[in-house]
């Protein structure tokens, strides 16, 4: 047999979840034909066949996670018989596992694999072992299983996969690496028309801030103590969904006219809503915008995803009493929060960036 393993999908990803198989054992496939859909880093990716041949076995089931380098399929070698399957239809994999996995021990009367101490514990707690689904090796019942049964019905746990898993890993990395600091201020947007495009204006203002302080439109590599200043603003747009947080990239935010910005933002939101956003469109952010005020909240200490060094958050705009020319007046105020990586960005750079953003927001439309 010839084994085809999960290839490297890029961006340091080390595993993927099987979403759907497009072939079954016995199918004949041709090179570059889609074999399987996998989900990783917030995108569904099709893995093509590396060459033509007959599929002998699928090595993972839908829902399983496969590490890079682990087997996906086995190709048949030598004489074969075509099973006549229609290639291209989604079919469940065979109920087989990689041959390297050990076989389960033989079962005996009663529940297999229950240690005497666990049986004694079950008797003490009044737990019926026959009603427990073991979570130990080969389905054996553990002390934790007995304790859980004694406590009564438990709230089921659900594996964290796909978008939420990618978010969890990114936030864990942020907490482990970044030294965050946050500065907040307000922009007076009372002069904005009622139909002002808030997100487009924020994107343009961030680009203005990056021109004033390029240190925030940068990537930082702590391992090599080096940074990369970007001339173009590739703005990450944080989008909340029921599946988790997506951060697609609005390319060249500073080089687009307002109408172009709006069109690009609409396209991004449509692709995210349809779960068709390409993997490349989730990579390469140089700075990020979180317009969390559309949901609620005024100020926030935000999370930075390395290698980026800054994220700007916009809270909910509201009428606020402020002092203008010595008199109290009511103006529409937009609260802003800038979180930056204090390992590489100074407080002065952050303050100048935020001042440039505010100036751009308060300028005439």
Image (tube, helix red, strand yellow):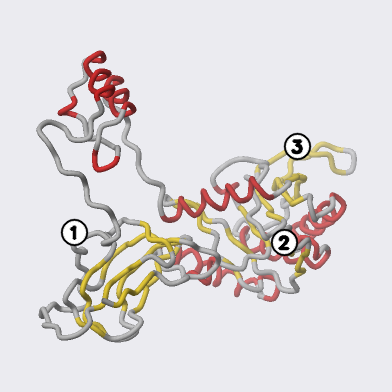
> x, y percentage for residue 256?
66, 75
Q: Which part of the image, by quadrant, shows the N terminus?
A: bottom left
Splitting the image into 4 quarters, where does residue 228 fall?
A: bottom right
Observer-side mark, 1 or 3, equals: 1
- 68, above or below 353, in the image: below
From the viewer's side, name the closer residue of 93 and 135: 135
Q: Mark 1, residues whose alpha carbon is within 10 Å: few (<14), some, or many (≥20)?
A: few
> x, y percentage for residue 223?
72, 59
Name the residue rendered at 77%, 58% in the picture.
357
**Real-space Cα distance between discs 2 and 1?**
45 Å
> x, y percentage for residue 299?
68, 41
Name the residue rendered at 72%, 61% in the picture.
221
**Real-space Cα distance between discs 1 and 3?**
67 Å
Question: Which residue is tagged 1?
Answer: 95
From the viewer's side, name the closer residue of 282 and 206: 282
Q: Is residue 147 left or right of residue 131?
A: right
Observer-side mark, 2 or 1, equals: 1
Q: Which mark is residue 263?
A: none
Q: Is residue 269 left or right of residue 109?
A: right
Q: Which mark is residue 321?
A: 3
Q: Mark 2, residues whose alpha carbon is within 10 Å: few (<14), some, or many (≥20)?
A: few
- 228, above or below 289, in the image: below
Q: Of label 1 and label 3, which has the lower sequence position? A: 1
From the viewer's side, name the closer residue of 4 and 19: 4
From the viewer's side, name the closer residue of 181 and 259: 181
Q: Secondary structure at mark 3?
A: strand
Question: Are the residues at dot 1 and dot 3 in contact (C-beta closer than 8 Å)?
Answer: no
- 209, above or below 111, in the image: below
Q: Of label 2 and label 1, which has the lower sequence position? A: 1
Name the residue rendered at 20%, 63% in the picture.
92
């Amino acid at each position: 047999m010839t084994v085809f393993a999960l290839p490297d999908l890029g961006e340091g990803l080390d595993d993927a979840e099987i979403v759907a198989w497009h072939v079954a054992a016995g199918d004949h496939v041709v090179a570059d034909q889609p074999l399987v859909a996998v989900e990783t880093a917030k995108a569904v990716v099709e893995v093509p066949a590396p060459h033509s041949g007959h599929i002998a076995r699928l090595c993972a089931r839908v829902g399983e996670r496969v590490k890079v380098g682990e087997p996906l399929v086995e190709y048949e070698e030598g004489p074969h018989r075509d099973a006549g399957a229609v290639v291209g239809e989604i079919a469940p994999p065979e109920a087989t596992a990689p041959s390297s996995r050990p076989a389960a021990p033989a079962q005996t009367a009663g529940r297999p694999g229950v240690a005497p101490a666990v049986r004694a514990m079950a008797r003490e707690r009044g737990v019926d072992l026959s009603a427990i689904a073991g979570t130990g090796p080969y389905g054996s019942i553990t002390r934790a299983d007995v304790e859980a049964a004694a406590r009564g019905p438990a709230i089921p746990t659900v594996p964290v996969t796909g978008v939420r898993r990618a978010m969890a890993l990114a936030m864990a990395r942020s907490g482990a690496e970044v030294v965050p600091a946050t500065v907040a201020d307000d922009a007076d947007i009372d002069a904005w028309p009622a139909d002002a495009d808030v997100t487009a204006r924020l994107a343009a203002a961030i680009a203005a801030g990056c021109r004033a302080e390029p240190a925030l439109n940068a990537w930082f590599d702590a391992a090599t103590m080096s940074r990369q200043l970007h001339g173009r603003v590739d703005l990450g747009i944080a989008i909340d969904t029921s599946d988790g947080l997506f951060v697609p990239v609005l390319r060249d935010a500073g080089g687009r006219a307002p109408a172009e910005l709006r069109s690009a933002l609409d396209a991004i939101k449509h692709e995210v809503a349809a779960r068709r956003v390409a993997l490349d469109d989730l990579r390469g952010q140089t700075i990020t915008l979180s317009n969390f005020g559309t949901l609620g909240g005024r100020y926030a200490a935000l999370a930075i995803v390395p290698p980026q060094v800054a994220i700007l958050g916009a809270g909910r705009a509201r009428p606020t009493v402020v002092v203008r020319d010595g008199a109290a007046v009511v103006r529409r105020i937009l609260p802003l929060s800038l979180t930056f990586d204090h390992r590489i960005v100074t407080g002065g750079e952050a303050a100048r960036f935020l001042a440039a953003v505010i100036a751009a927001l308060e300028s005439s439309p």
